[in-house]
Structures are given as C-alpha cells and as structure tokens.
Amino acid sequence: MKTKHDLIAEAWTLIEKSIIYYRNRPIGTVAALEAGSDALNYDQCFVRDFVLSALAFLISGKPEIVRNFLIGTLHLQSHEPQMDSFKPGPGLMPASFKVVVKDGEEYLTADFGEHAIARVPPVDSCLWWIILLRAYVKATGDTALAHQSEFQQGIKLILEMCLAHRFAMYPTMLVPDGAFMIDRRMGVYEHPLEIQVLFYAALRAAKELLLPNDANLSCSNSVTQRLQPLTYHLREYYWIDLNRLNEIYRFKGDEFGQEIANRFNIYPESIPDWLTEWLPDNGGYLAGNLGPGRMDFRFFALGNLMAIITALASEAESQKIMNLIEYRWQDLIGYMPMKLCYPALEGRDWQIITGSDPKNMPWSYHNGGNWPVLLWLLTAAAHKTNRLDIAEKAIDIAEKRLRQDGWPEYYDGKNARLIGKQSRQYQAWTIAAFIVAKELMANPSHLELISFEME
Ligand code: GLC
C-alpha cells in the first residue's frame, strides 16, 4: 500500500508533467494531463486553473514559473480600445492560452472566450491575475516586479474596466452569464457572488500593489471609494440566516420611495421550498446573486469560502458558513469535497436557465456537481475560522479517492458518489488543490498568500 507521502510525491510528479514551456521556460500548466482524444481546450493553460498550480509552486519555493506566467499573461492582456466589437475590450485577461509554433518560432495565443466551448467572456481571469500577483509578491518579496510600469499599467487597465460606471446603480459588478469558473449558462448573470467576492479581493490586492504616485492617484481613489460600499452591500444584502429569512418572508412587495425595507423588491414567494427546512438555526451563507426582483438562494461554495478567506464575511458570519457546511455535510461535501452549487436546477428550471445544457444535467458538473479543486478553499477557510476538524475530515475523504479515481475534474450525484460523466482525468487544479490543502495543514502561515485581515 502506498503511503500518504507517496501520494504527495505522485501529485508533484503529475504537476511537473503538466508544465507548459515557452521558449524553454516554464510558463503555465495544462488544464488536464489526460484529456483524451477530444482534448478540446484542456491542453491549454487556463488563468483560473493555474492559480492553484501557482500557489503550490509558491508554497514550495519555486516562484519562477509564476513570474513567467504573470509576465506572459500581462502581454496577452487586451490593450487597445477596439473599434471591432467582436474583440475583447482593454483590460480583459484571457480565459486560457497556448504555445503555437510559426516559422520555427514559439508564440503565445490567447482565448478570450471566442473559442472556448461555451463562448463566454472570462471576467474572473483579470481578478485572479491581480490576486495572484499579490500572492507572488508576498511569497517572494519581489515588489520590483509589481512596481514595473508595465505591471502598474496592467493593474490600472483591469481596474478601469471593472470600475467603469455603466448601467447598474449598485457597487457590485454587472456581468454576463458564466463569467467565471461556471463558464456556461447557469443563471449566474447580473451580480453573481463569485465575481463580487473576487472583485472585492482584487480591489484590496490592488490597493497594496499600486504605487502611491500622481499617475495612480485617481485610480487608487476610485478603488477606495468603491471598496466601502461594495463591502457594505455584500455584507448587508447578500447575507441569509434564519433571522434574515424571517425578514424576507414578511417583506412587502412593490413599495415606492427611498426608505423601504425591501430595497430590491424581492417577493417572499420566491423563497424556495427547500430552504426553510435546510437552513440550520446556527448557520448562514451569502446568497448566490442579488438584483432587482431577484435573490438567488442557491449556495455557491467558491464565493462563500473566498468571502471567509478574504474577510469579506464578518467573523460571526464566517463561523455560521462553516456551521452550515458541517450541518449539511452530506449535501455539501458528501463523498468528495465539495459541491460547487447547491441545490441543482431541475426540470423546467434546468431547461430554461441552462438552455437544456446536457453537460449541466441536475447534480452534474456545474449544476450540483462536486469539485475536488474546492478542497483548498475549504481548508483555507477552516484555518481562518479555526475549524480544523472540518478540513481534516474533508482531506481524509479526498485522500481516499482521488488517486484511485485518476484525479478527476469533478464528481456527479447528490452526494458525489460517481466520477463526473464527462470528467477529465489528471486535472491539474484537482491535483494542485490537494497539494495546497496538505501544505496549508502542515504550515498554516501559507494562508497569508491569499487571505486578508478584517478592515
Ligand atoms: C471547464 C470549467 C472551467 C475550467 C476549465 C479548465 O471549462 O468549467 O472552470 O477553467 O474547464 O479546467
């Protein structure tokens, strides 16, 4: 029988194998090592997927690949204001990239979602990029890289795109459906929690990374001005616990004017049946989405766990989120940590909201599937809240199955007993997340690469 130590060694061998080289330097990792004959774009380096490999490399004192990645992707960032509305706007970072050879020379080509299967723009890439830059600087002390004018310019381009005042009158960011890890139609358009939490983290990271000079003054001011209402808005209006549910249940609809309790005109009838029974007395979470006449009551793991890690959720709320996970263990963790979104869209909802997407069948893939990549977030959140037993139990589950199952991308079924129907094997972020989770257990100080203190 192989020991736990062998497991980490195997994980590392696989990550090393997944490295992409560009002009003889490591620059990223492929999404999946064994993508099969229909590799689609799983042989590319995805920005959001690489964050996990990057954290593993940073923690293990191998920052070079992360540095190369940050420089390489910065060059891929869209720059020029586009006359062609089919092209990405300035500031956008690609979903993925790959190395191509032309006339004997290697080049990087980027995909901003125009080739990717579900054809969605990757709003999260630029947010993760800033968050990763901060992690790199924290791990290496290489502030010089972030202070280079190209990097300062890159950060500002991202911020200008995200902070632009468009049609919404909320501090949250308005995005199309499938703009992040859930990169297909799933009813996560408008103001999905994931994007808002990443936006908040990216703003906080940018505050640390932007040099205090005249050229940055107006941008830095805009960041500060946005952070405070954004934090208030998310804490105040996205939060759901039994008290809040009682308030929503007794909301009056269709009120006019400024001083009203039901600011978003949420109808109590929209509270789903499952929720009242499901929510434990001492639990709570941040709602999946909030907009006019719409509160998405689904639980989304990434947004909630990142809210804990980045101190967007208060300490009391963070404990309540962990209580919920503990109390609803079978639903949210089951046989593989952890569920991306709960519950699944079924029947007519699935037809209308996903456009009858066969990959996102109920309790599969993004629609109620379980993703081992989330293990690192659960572990980090457990450290932040001092709930280590939760992390230990979850890692134990993952440890027993992941290698045996070939490090799958995701699992299916209400409790994740099945390996995902179209799941890839040897998925790099599954493997890297396992390494990061184990390293966090061994040395919790690594948490500081990604966490923030309460402001
Ligand atoms: C799928 C996932 C996406 C991930 C990509 C590469 O498209 O939905 O989140 O980045 O695969 O692993």
Image (tube, rainbow, N blue to C red):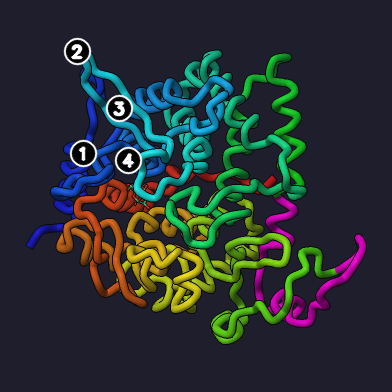
Q: CA distance from mark 2 to mark 4?
A: 31 Å
Q: Label 4, on which residue? A: 53
Above or below — where is 230 with respect to 412? above
The range drawn in magenta is: 231-260
355 and 385: which is toward the camera: 355
Q: CA distance from mark 3 to mark 4?
A: 11 Å
Question: Which label number is shown at residue 18?
Answer: 1
Question: Which label number is shown at residue 27?
Answer: 3
State which tag comes first along the sequence, 2 or 1: 1
> Is disc 1 surrounded by few (<14), some (14 to 19) or many (20+) residues within 10 Å?
many
Q: Residue at x 62, y 82 (%)?
A: 281
Query: Quarter of the image holding residue 379?
Result: bottom left
The quadrant of the picture occupied by the N terminus is bottom left
**Marks 1 & 3, CB-CB < 8 Å contact:** no
Circle 2 sits in a helix, a strand or a loop, which is it?
loop
Could you say where residue 447 lies in the image, as x and y percent from the top left? 46, 46
Above or below — where is 331 with respect to 371? below
Q: Is residue 87 magenta?
A: no
